[in-house]
């Protein structure tokens, strides 16, 4: 991608010392169009970047929905969509065209303004998250020095859109679905944020590129292996992010087997499509954030080599986590509401605080990351995995006690 787009753009984008859009306008656009005001050039550059993301983000569901249907078919020993296009590759495009021409129904007794505004709030927040994710060394819209804090803040606004959608529908099913969704999202934001804090403690920065820069020495320099506590934090982050985007087994807000579809029961046509686009965009976004924080980001696997590095490597790692989400969806049953909340408040949050305490102690013991600290960390992780596997085998191998009739 860096070979296709102008290199001067990325030189300006990665300059975090000032406004990269105005720098690009002054150094690239103004010399070619001398009479263009700098302010107008800056606005044009920002609109161009926004246009790129607006064009790309809605394409994610077209690819990911088809991939999920094919994955589900493979797991269930069937073929999946095969009728539209070669091997069914145009099926999701046909579904999108159908949604465009469907009737746009608005509940007559609902709050029309909030009803119309809710899907755009959710889509806009999902879209804005991508501005701080570094897809490559020079492929980054804005290198915030508080990038991960910005991502957490902007993604939290999605809860307001969910509540707006349920309340404005004037339907008890939608209202209950929105409150259930809000309770789930707010709850799992706590262990998710605490897991991110372990990474921030090790790196000492909130900037996304700074976090990736500390993982440039290959596979074993990834933050998931830096300490046993970041290893635990990765799994808590990933499972909490699945709950954040309402995926099985945490899809209580939008349970497909129920008669109603949660907070967007009353939506149809393109307004429903915006919720659908936001869901799959969020899937890709949380996977990209997990790759950036724990799996090396755009850095390669081998030190000194660009194997699985750069933009292609980043996308491959991200799609790997997306595939894992799809795998879990078609493997695990849905949790009950009480099980979902117990997992968060009784287990994930205490473990997350333990990870923060352990990360602090680990940082005091090992002042710098060297071969000894990483070797000890990997050894502890390996022994822990073997012990957990043996314990799980003993627990699941027990025969259930006979039940009295």
Image (cartoon, helix red, strand yellow):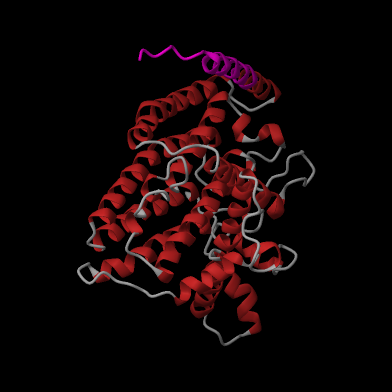
Residue at far front of view: 405
10 and 155: which is toward the camera = 155
Image-quadrant location for residue 335: top left
Total numbered labels placed on residues in the image: 0
- Magenta span covers which residues? 381-405
Q: Residue furthest bottom?
A: 35
Q: Residue at x 77, y 47 (%)?
A: 306
Q: Residue at x 63, y 59 (%)?
A: 139
Q: Could you tell me what secondary structure mostly forms the magenta stretch?
A: helix
Q: Residue at x 31, y 46 (%)?
A: 180
| Horizontal side of residue 225 vs 395, given as left or right | right
User: Is residue 403 a member of the stretch shown in magenta?
Assistant: yes
Of 138 and 243, which appears nearest the observer?
243
Figure quadrant of the N terminus? bottom right
Quadrant location of the C terminus in the rendered image: top left
Q: Is residue 368 above or below residue 387?
A: below
Relative image position of residue 184 (x, y in whole percent)? 35, 42
Task: Residue 161: give x, y in percent of width and height.
Answer: 33, 58
């Amino acid at each position: 991608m860096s070979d296709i787009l102008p290199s001067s753009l990325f030189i300006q984008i990665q300059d975090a010392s000032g406004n990269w859009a105005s720098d690009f306008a002054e150094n690239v656009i103004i010399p070619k169009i001398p009479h263009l005001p700098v302010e107008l050039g800056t606005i044009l550059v920002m609109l161009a970047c926004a246009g790129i993301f607006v064009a790309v983000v809605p394409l994610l569901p077209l690819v990911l929905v088809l991939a999920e249907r094919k994955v589900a078919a493979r797991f269930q020993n069937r073929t999946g969509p095969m009728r539209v296009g070669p091997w069914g590759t145009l099926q999701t495009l046909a579904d999108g065209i159908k949604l465009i021409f469907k009737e746009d129904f608005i509940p007559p007794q609902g709050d029309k303004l909030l009803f119309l505004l809710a899907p755009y709030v959710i889509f806009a927040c999902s879209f804005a998250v991508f501005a701080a994710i570094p897809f490559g060394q020079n492929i980054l819209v804005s290198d915030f020095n508080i990038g991960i804090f910005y991502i957490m803040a902007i993604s939290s606004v999605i809860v307001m859109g969910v509540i707006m959608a349920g309340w404005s529908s004037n339907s008890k099913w939608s209202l209950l679905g929105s409150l259930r969704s809000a309770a789930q999202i707010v709850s799992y934001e706590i262990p998710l944020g605490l897991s991110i804090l372990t990474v921030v403690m090790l790196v000492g920065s909130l900037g996304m590129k700074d976090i990736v820069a500390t993982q440039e020495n290959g596979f074993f320099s990834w933050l998931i292996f830096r300490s046993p506590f970041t290893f635990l934090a990765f799994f808590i982050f990933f499972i909490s992010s699945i709950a954040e985007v309402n995926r099985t087994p945490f899809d209580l807000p939008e349970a497909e087997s129920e008669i109603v579809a949660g907070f967007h029961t009353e939506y149809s046509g393109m307004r429903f499509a915006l919720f659908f686009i936001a869901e799959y965009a969020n899937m890709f976004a949380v996977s990209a954030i997990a790759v950036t924080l724990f799996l090396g980001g755009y850095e390669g696997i081998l030190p000194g080599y660009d194997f699985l590095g750069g933009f292609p490597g980043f996308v491959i790692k991200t799609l790997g986590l997306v595939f894992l989400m799809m795998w879990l969806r078609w493997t695990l049953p849905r949790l009950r509401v009480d099980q979902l909340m117990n997992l968060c408040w009784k287990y994930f949050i205490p473990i997350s605080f333990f990870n923060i305490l352990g990360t602090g102690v680990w940082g005091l013991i090992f002042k710098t990351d060297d071969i000894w600290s990483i070797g000890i960390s990997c050894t502890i992780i390996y022994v822990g995995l073997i012990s957990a596997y043996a314990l799980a085998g003993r627990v699941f191998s027990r025969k259930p006690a006979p039940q009295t009739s």
